Image (spheres, rainbow, N blue to C red):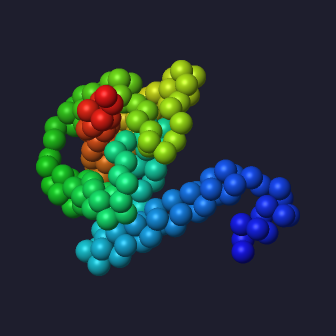
Amino acid sequence: MIQDYLQASFGYTDFQIEQIRYTVISLLSEISKLFIMGIFFTMTHHLPQYLIAIIVLLILRTCTGGLHFKHYFSCLLVSFLIFYLGICQLPNITLPRPAYFILLLICVIINYLFAPVVSSYRPIPNGILVRKSKRQAFAMITLYALIMFIVPVNQYTITGFWIILLQSFQLIVANIRKRRSVP
């Protein structure tokens, strides 16, 4: 058994084995969801936008957190909904160029107020990690605003914009959910 091998060869404790198991299961779960959604976006000819959305969301979500679900299917469903809205639906809404920057500024404020929202399976971050998370979100969204200012508006920058907006909205929902679950 792998557990016996790891304990005998490397001296891992039962707790460390559980951490490894959790990490492997989490990675496989996330990869499978990305793959399933990738099939859909490939079939609907939105694969390039999907890849951009993954990059933007991965960078932002790793520092801000967001909604977390205990079941694979509910996580897949909400993840798909966010990607579908950000890639296929919301980019059809045309906004005046200044509106993008105003909304990104609002996203910076939302991320400052609500980030990070971590999974109940992870330890609550200390003040240093919280400040680091807020700075990273600020830097990422500000950099994205700069990219949108320099690069002409196109389907890829618009997709990234909507993903940032949806992730920021998700932080508000996650924060409300978290407050309601605390006695």
Q: Residue at x 56, y 57 (%)?
A: 22
Q: Nearer the viewer, residue 155 or 53?
A: 53
Q: Taking 100 as reference, is 88 above or below it?
A: below
Task: Report x, y in % for residue 63.
Answer: 49, 38
Q: Residue at x 20, y 33 (%)?
A: 99
Q: Residue at x 83, y 56 (%)?
A: 11
Q: Nearer the viewer, residue 95 or 161?
A: 161
- In the picture as drawn, the residue positioned furthest to the bottom comes out as 43
Q: Quadrant of residue 145?
A: top left
Can residue 65 be seen at all in this image of the molecule?
yes
Query: For the N terminus, which image quadrant?
Result: bottom right
Q: Quadrant of residue 132?
A: top right
Task: Report x, y in % for residue 31.
Answer: 48, 66
Q: Residue at x 31, y 71 (%)?
A: 41
Q: Taking 179 as reference, is 173 above or below it?
A: below
Task: Report x, y in % for residue 83.
Answer: 29, 58
